[in-house]
Image (cartoon, grey):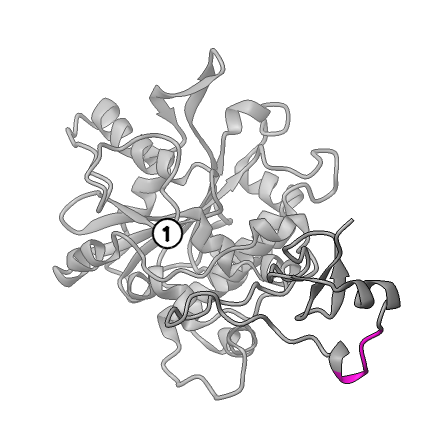
Amino acid sequence: MTRYRCDSCNEDRDAPVCIKCGADTRDLSLEEAAAGLRPSLDETRVVPPPPRNAGVPPADPAPSRRRPEPAEAADAPDPVSEIHGLDEFHALLDRGVKAVVMCGGAQTGKSEIAAGFVRARNVYRGDAQFLTLRAPLRTDYALGGTTPDHVWYQVIDDKTTFLDPSGEFFRRLSLEERQKFGLPDVTENDFQFMQRAARQLAGVVCVVDLTKAVDIRSSAPWRRQEDDLNFILAAMRWLRWDKLALPPHLGLSVNIAQRVKALPMLDVPVLVLFSKGDQLTRITNESPLRFAKRRLPVLHGAVMTHARRFRYDFCHTMIRSGGQDRAVDHPCGVLLPVEWILRRPFRWLPMQLPSRLLGGGK
C-alpha cells in the first residue's frame, strides 16, 4: 500500500490529502517508508499550511469552545437599546398630560385592567371612549399583554393617560432577578421607560397576579411579587423627588435605599389591584385591606412606607372559556378604584389626608 508524507504535520498518511490539516501529501520513497524515518525535533513543529487562495483574507478563527451556560441563563433579561412607543408617550406629556403608571410583571393583567376601565366607563357611565392603537405598531389593541420593549398608553381624558410598560421592564428592575443571573446593579437607563412619567405623575397602580403563587398554602405565596413592588415603589419615590446627583462609585440600588426615607412620600394615590381574583374566590372572600395585611405583609409595609394615600381592591376583567381568555362585558373591581385615583374631592385642603388616618385603604 502506498504511503504518503504530510510535510506540514510531519506525519505519514494513507491518503494523498492529510486528514488533519487538509494539505496535499507526497508519496514516500521506498527507502523512507522502509526506514520509518523519525523527524527531528525542529521538524515536529507544526507549520500552518499556506493559504490556497492568494489575495483572499483568511477566515476568522473558529471561536474557542466554552463551557455551556446554564439552561436558565437563556431567560436572563436582555438590556434594552430602544423603547418603542416612548416618544409618542412623551409627546402627550409635553402637552401637560399626567400619567397613571401601571406597575407589575409580565402577564399580570395590567393591559387588561386599562382596557377594562375603558369598557366599564362605557357600560356604567355612558362615557363613550375607544381604545387607542398600540404605538408604534399601529395595530388594534389585542389582549395578551404589551409587546416586550414597548410601552403602551391609553388616554383617559384630556388630563390623564395610562402608561402600560411591558412587564419585561419591571423584570429588569427586580433585584432578585439580577442577582439570580449575576447581572450588574440597575442603572438610570433601566428607569428610562418611566423616568419622565414619575415627574408628571397622577397615580400609581400596582398589579398583583393572585394566580402566580409559589404555593398557595405557603405563608408568603406572592413574596416575589411583593419584593419587586417594594423596590418599584421606592424607586418611584426616588425618581419623583431626588434632585441630587448620584455619587460616583455608588450603586443605584444602594443610593435609593439610602436616600428614599429622607424624601417626601408619594403625593399621588397608590392603588393596589389583586388581579384575576375570580379564580381564587376561596381566599378572597374578605376585605382587600385585611387580605393585604394578612397575606402580603411586605407589600403592605411598602405601601404604608411610601404612599400617603392608598387603596386595595380585587378585580377581574377576563374570563376563561373553552380554553381561551376573553374580555368580560362587565369588568369587576376596576371602575371605582381607578376613579378614586382620578377624583380628588379634598383637593381644596392644603395637604391630602393620609390613608392611615382614615382607616387605611379599602
The magenta segment: 38-42
Position above or below: 167 against 116: below
Visible residue check, residue 265:
no
Position in image of residue 34 (x %, y %):
86, 63
Among all residues in the image, which is located at the extreme top?
Answer: 322
The x, y position of residue 106, in whole percent, is 47, 43
Q: Which residue is mark 1?
A: 149
Among all residues in the image, which is located at the extreme bottom? 248
**Total label count?**
1
List x then y, in percent, for residue 264: 42, 72
Q: Is residue 221 magenta?
A: no
Residue in front for this viewpoint, 139 or 41: 41
Which residue is at 24% across, 22% downward? 123
Q: Is residue 169 left or right of residue 184?
A: left
Please tell me whether the stretch drawn in magenta is mainly helix, strand or loop: loop
- The answer to whether 182 appears left or right of 108 in the picture is right
Residue 316 location, quadrant = top left
Q: Is residue 353 above or below residue 157?
A: below
In this view of the protein, which residue sits in the foreground, 200 or 62? 62
Write down the quadrant of residue 12 in the picture.
bottom right
Give 192 or 357, whichever is nearer the viewer.
192
Measured from the top left, where is residue 101 in percent x and y? Answer: 35, 52
Determine crowd level at label 1: few under 14, some 14-19, many 20+ residues with C-alpha closer than 10 A: many
320 on left or right of 338: right
Q: Residue at x 78, y 48 (%)?
A: 1
Q: Amino acid at mark 1?
A: Asp
Q: For the point 40% across and 65% down, which residue is it? A: 191
Horizontal side of residue 10 vs 153, given as left or right: right
Q: Secondary structure at mark 1?
A: loop
